[in-house]
């Protein structure tokens, strides 16, 4: 009931459609309730009584009620359809906005395929309830209770027989609901799992084919699909156990009431016209009883869908603006990490992390995989909250800043390059949709992307495929760098941004970036020494702590972990250089 109440509360902005629809629905069904009475009067007054002058009035009444019912049904259909469509529009828009505000941790725990299943199938389930389900439920309630009341006025003894059967139907219906609700909940959960599996397999189809794992994935998909089949069949078995019984109880009432009513007419305790009216109301009572299982089935599906959608709404964003915010003006980009401790779940990634990056300087962060390099810059944009300590920019804790203003000043080139299925130009100006083309072109040149873009048939108007399909890894990274530069941020984060480009192209990018990085606070996360050697300070992480700190030359002099990485990366190059020098110095062989 709480879920139903919540659905109703969300209908308030569109209450006018609901009111018009319900008024039209009540009028349409009131005409149905009146028609059997007129049929009974025709039998008693015209056919048996011989009062023919009443017949035109009765026929005109039937015709008028039929026209009124048709008009009301049209208004009812349009009104409830408008209600459902507007409701779904608000729900989908609200959920999308809500999901866009969720922190990274939400997407760490919830699969994209599951979310897509909720945003499509579950929302459609609610729409079907509002567009058609509510109408069916209300109509059947009006038919059942309206007919029952009129039957008591016609013949209370015969109506009493109906009342004695109704509790049996109610008990069966409640038992059916209790079982089918759990079954449908399991179906929706498994449907989300199946959607996730489908989304992952289609998105990763190239990896699947590259490793020739088609058969393995087919079997894995088949397992989830078979589980979905099992759960759906379970709901079918429950439906088959109860719905036919409800149908039988409804159908059984018709011959029972006709038999008793016929005997009463023969015995003289009931007129033939009343029996005709009574038979007209029988189907209005028995039909709701017969389709009660279907109504419960539909209502349960909608409620199950709504519960999952409301679950997302109730989660709430873990990271949000405070009631009172503070933002440094001017925003220079002086970053300080003060005794920061951070982790994911039970795992601690950063421990007592301290770092000071003056405005306009470049800080490089290195270390083995899993040492927390990306976590550092994620805390900077407040995509996660640190457990202990403070992250300050220009002396203000990022927790006290408005999120939109904070992230507007930070440009990211992320470790996993993501491009939208849009033109290259629109991908570059994504952060600044109103940026002029010269800004886009300048950013592309700085990122060494202008050359390969110019070689494409449509140039900057070339539409890239899903997630940047059609571009190489290095090309995607260069477009991503251009996107960050076009954003013109005060703080720039380059997270392994040139890992997919060759050394020569990387050198060219770095040469052009020197001008772009001037007066910007820049964080460079990289594994290549060549990417970080010109940084103002280099930080080497180990076990979530700063193990070494200094410039390139200072760290080489220490001959610590950074020196070992330098030796590993340049040993082969040094050997090749030495061999070439030795060959050049050796005397030439005389032929």
Image: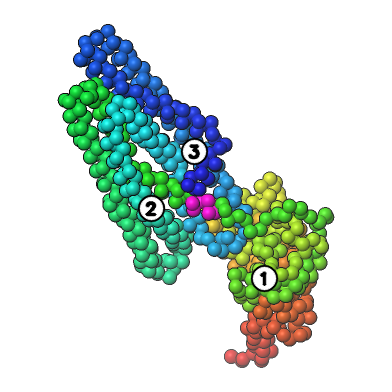
Residue identified by numbered label 2: 178
Residue density around tag 2, few if under 14, some if 14–19, many if 20 or more, within 10 Å: few
Q: Is residue 532 visible?
A: no
When asked about the image quadrant of residue 194, the answer is bottom left
Question: Range of the magenta residues?
Answer: 307-312
Q: Is residue 524 left or right of residue 55?
A: right
Q: Position of residue 229 (x, y in %)?
A: 33, 58
Residue identified by numbered label 3: 85
Residue identified by numbered label 1: 342
Q: Is residue 488 above or below residue 577?
A: above
Question: Is residue 473 highlighted in magenta?
Answer: no
Question: Is residue 311 highlighted in magenta?
Answer: yes
How far apart marks 2 and 1 lie (CA) works out to 45 Å
- Is the C-beta separation of discs 2 and 1 under 8 Å? no
Residue density around tag 1, few if under 14, some if 14–19, many if 20 or more, within 10 Å: many
N-term-proximal mark, 2 vs 1: 2
Q: How many marks?
A: 3
Label 3: element kind:
helix
N-term-proximal mark, 3 vs 1: 3
Q: Is residue 67 visible?
A: yes
Decide whether the magenta segment is chiefly helix, strand or loop. Answer: helix
Label 1: element kind:
strand
Q: Residue at x 37, y 33 (%)?
A: 145
Name the residue nearer the viewer: 500 or 565.
565
Q: Is residue 132 above or below residue 571?
A: above
Q: Residue at x 56, y 63 (%)?
A: 108
When asked about the image quadrant of residue 498, the answer is bottom right
N-term-proximal mark, 3 vs 2: 3
Q: Position of residue 319 (x, y in %)?
A: 66, 58
Q: Residue at x 75, y 56 (%)?
A: 401
């Amino acid at each position: 009931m709480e879920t139903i109440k919540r659905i109703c509360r969300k209908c308030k902005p569109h209450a006018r459609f609901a009111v018009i629809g319900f008024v039209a629905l009540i009028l349409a069904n009131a005409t149905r309730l009146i028609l059997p009475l007129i049929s009974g009067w025709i039998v008693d007054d015209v056919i048996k009584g011989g009062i023919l002058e009443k017949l035109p009035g009765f026929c005109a009444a039937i015709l008028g009620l039929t026209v009124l019912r048709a008009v009301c049904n049209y208004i009812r259909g349009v009104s409830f359809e408008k209600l459902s469509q507007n409701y779904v529009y608000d729900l989908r828009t609200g959920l999308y906005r809500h999901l866009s505000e969720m922190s990274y941790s939400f997407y760490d725990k919830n699969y994209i395929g599951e979310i897509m299943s909720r945003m499509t199938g579950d929302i459609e389930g609610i729409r079907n309830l509002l567009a058609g389900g509510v109408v069916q439920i209300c109509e059947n309630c009006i038919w059942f209770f309206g007919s029952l009341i009129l039957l008591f006025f016609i013949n209370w003894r015969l109506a009493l027989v109906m009342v004695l059967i109704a509790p049996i139907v109610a008990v069966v219906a409640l038992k059916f609901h209790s079982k089918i609700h759990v079954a449908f909940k399991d179906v929706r959960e498994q449907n989300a799992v199946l959607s996730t599996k489908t989304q992952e397999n289609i998105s990763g189809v190239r990896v699947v084919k590259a490793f020739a794992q088609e058969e393995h994935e087919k079997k894995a998909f088949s397992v989830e699909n078979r589980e979905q089949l099992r759960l759906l069949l379970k709901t079918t078995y429950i439906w088959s156990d109860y719905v036919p019984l409800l149908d039988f109880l409804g159908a059984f009432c018709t011959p029972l009431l006709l038999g008793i009513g016929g005997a009463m007419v023969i015995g003289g305790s009931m007129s033939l016209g009343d029996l005709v009216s009574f038979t007209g109301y029988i189907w209005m009572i028995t039909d709701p009883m017969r389709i009660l299982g279907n109504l419960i089935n539909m209502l349960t599906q909608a409620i199950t869908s709504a519960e999952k959608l409301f679950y997302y709404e109730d989660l709430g964003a873990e990271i949000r603006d405070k009631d009172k915010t503070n933002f440094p003006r001017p925003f220079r980009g002086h970053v300080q990490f003060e005794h920061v401790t951070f982790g994911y779940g039970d795992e601690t990634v950063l421990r007592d992390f301290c770092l000071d990056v003056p405005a306009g300087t470049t800080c490089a962060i290195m270390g083995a995989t899993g040492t927390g390099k990306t976590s550092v810059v994620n805390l900077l944009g407040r995509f996660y909250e640190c457990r202990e300590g403070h992250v300050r920019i220009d002396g203000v804790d990022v927790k006290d800043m408005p999120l939109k203003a904070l992230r507007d000043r930070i440009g990211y080139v992320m470790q996993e390059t993501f491009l939208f299925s849009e033109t290259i130009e629109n991908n570059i100006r994504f952060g600044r949709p109103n940026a002029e083309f010269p800004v886009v072109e300048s950013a592309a040149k700085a990122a060494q992307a202008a050359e390969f873009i110019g070689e494409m048939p449509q140039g900057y108007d070339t539409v890239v495929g899903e997630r940047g399909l059609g571009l190489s890894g290095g090309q995607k990274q260069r477009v991503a760098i251009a996107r960050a530069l076009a954003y013109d941020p005060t703080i720039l984060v380059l997270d392994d941004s040139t890992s997919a480009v060759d050394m020569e192209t990387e050198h060219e990018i770095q040469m052009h970036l020197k001008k772009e990085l001037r007066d910007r606070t820049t964080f460079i996360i990289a594994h290549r020494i060549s990417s970080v050697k010109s940084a103002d300070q280099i930080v080497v992480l180990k076990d979530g702590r700063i193990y070494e700190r200094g410039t390139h030359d200072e760290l080489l002099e220490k001959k610590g972990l950074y020196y070992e990485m330098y030796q590993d990366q340049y040993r082969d190059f040094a050997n090749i250089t030495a061999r070439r020098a030795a060959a050049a110095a050796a005397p030439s062989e005389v032929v």
